[in-house]
Image: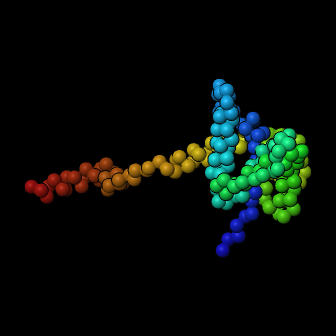
Amino acid sequence: MAKTRNRLLIVDGYNVLRSGSRYQAITNQPDYTDDAFNQAREALINDVVNFAGHNVKAIIVFDAGENEYSTGSQETVGGVRILFSPAGSSADKVIEKLAHDARARHVETLVVTSDATIQDTVFGFGVDRMSAEGFCQEVEFYYDDARLDETPKVSEKFIVADRVDHETVDRLKTLRDARGR
């Protein structure tokens, strides 16, 4: 039996929402409530759930460090852990700690962020990183592939005449017609 790879995807939630074109298109809508931002956050969560699938554990970290009431709560949606950093702690620190701990356990880890400081820090741990825009492109490729896989395919009907040269087809037709007389 093949050994499955132990992989982890860590997403810098608010950074990806601000930096990724896929989510900017949602948040840039004229909206005087938080609905557009909530829609973008839901879109990100759905994209991570679909992108990670069953083969990759995924964590999305949102920064709530400046919210004095944040307890660092977490929940799971579609197998993806969603964390809010606790009061007084930034998402950056949480992401760096998660990446460091995962690497120490020999888990193949990818951090998605466009924050250069986080990218440099996790790269120093030996962790792979991807920009927010790179993630948006990968998600688009994923959905394009899924859409192509779901497109019904019509099987082609092959007949002998398609596989034989025209001269032979003509001879066969002549033989067929001669027998019918």
Identify the residue shown where x is 67% and y is 26%: 32
Identify the residue shown where x is 86% and y is 45%: 87
| Colouring of the image | rainbow
Hey, which quadrant is residue 5 in on the image?
bottom right
Taking the view exactly as shown, the residue that stands out farthest to the left is 181
Left or right of residue 138: residue 96: right
Which percent across, then down, holds residue 119?
85, 45
Whether residue 54 can be seen here: yes
Identify the residue shown where x is 84% and y is 54%: 99
From the viewer's side, name the closer residue of 114 and 41: 41
Which percent across, then down, holds residue 38?
67, 38
Identify the residue shown where x is 71% and y is 43%: 135
Tell me if residue 22 comes above or below residue 84 in the rendering: above
From the viewer's side, name the closer residue of 130 and 167: 130
Whether residue 129 can be seen here: no
Count of numbered badges drawn on the protein: 0
Tell me if residue 81 comes above or below residue 17 in the rendering: below
Image quadrant in which the N terminus is located: bottom right
